């Protein structure tokens, strides 16, 4: 059986793999729009990826405008909500993943597909949680 930590990690990957099309891009847009001047001034030569842009903004934290600070705060609040939703789904679907999907490799939506293929047998708790966070 998968431990709760592994289930959490797997669901995290599942959740974040399905969310970036909506939430992930929204978070990037919030920061890109709110910190446009700072990105063009301080971070224009930074290669995106692996947190380098965020590190650049952090390095120039004392020079950030109120608009940029708010954008970073707003993005962090949205991310915090997504993490809370992930925790909720992890708790509600752990038994179903153990029961129906323990042999399924995480990634590329395979666990979500497994849950959907077993929809008739998946607990209402899991179904409700997934619906509440927009995975269904």
Image: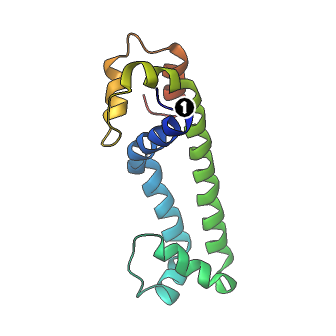
Q: Position of residue 111 (x, y in %)?
A: 36, 32
Quadrant (top left/top right/bottom left/bottom right) for the C terminus? top left
Res 69 seen here: yes
Q: Position of residue 92 (x, y in %)?
A: 56, 25
Q: Residue at x 59, y 37 (%)?
A: 87
SS at badge 1: helix
Q: For the view shown, which residue lies furthest in the top direction?
A: 120
Q: For the view shown, which residue lies furthest in the front direction?
A: 1
Left or right: residue 111 compared with residue 96? left
Residue under numbered circle 1: 89
Res 93 seen here: no
> On screen, 30 above or below 38?
above
Colouring rule applied to residues: rainbow
Left or right: residue 35 compared with residue 102? right
Q: Residues within 10 Å of mark 1 (few under 14, many from 20)?
A: many
**Front position in the image: 99 or 11:** 99
Please tell me in which quadrant of the rendered image residue 86 appears: top right
Please tell me in which quadrant of the rendered image residue 25 appears: bottom left
Q: Residue at x 49, y 81 (%)?
A: 39
> On screen, 111 above or below 107?
above
**Front position in the image: 90 or 81:** 90
Q: How many marks?
A: 1
Q: Position of residue 91 (x, y in %)?
A: 59, 29
Q: Residue at x 54, y 83 (%)?
A: 38
> On screen, 122 above or below 51?
above
Q: Position of residue 67 (x, y in %)?
A: 64, 73
> On screen, 47 above or below 125?
below
């Amino acid at each position: 059986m998968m431990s709760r930590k592994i289930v959490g990690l797997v669901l995290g990957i599942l959740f974040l793999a399905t969310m970036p099309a909506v939430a992930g891009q929204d978070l990037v847009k919030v920061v890109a729009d709110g910190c446009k001047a700072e990105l063009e001034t301080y971070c224009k030569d930074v290669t995106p990826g692996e947190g380098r842009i965020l590190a650049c903004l952090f390095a120039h934290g004392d020079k950030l405008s109120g608009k940029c600070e708010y954008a970073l705060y707003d993005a962090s609040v949205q991310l915090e909500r997504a993490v809370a939703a992930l925790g909720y789904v992890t708790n509600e679907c752990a038994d179903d993943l153990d029961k129906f999907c323990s042999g399924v490799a995480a990634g590329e939506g395979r666990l979500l597909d497994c849950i959907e293929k077993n929809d008739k047998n998946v607990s209402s708790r899991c179904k409700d949680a997934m619906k509440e966070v927009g995975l269904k």
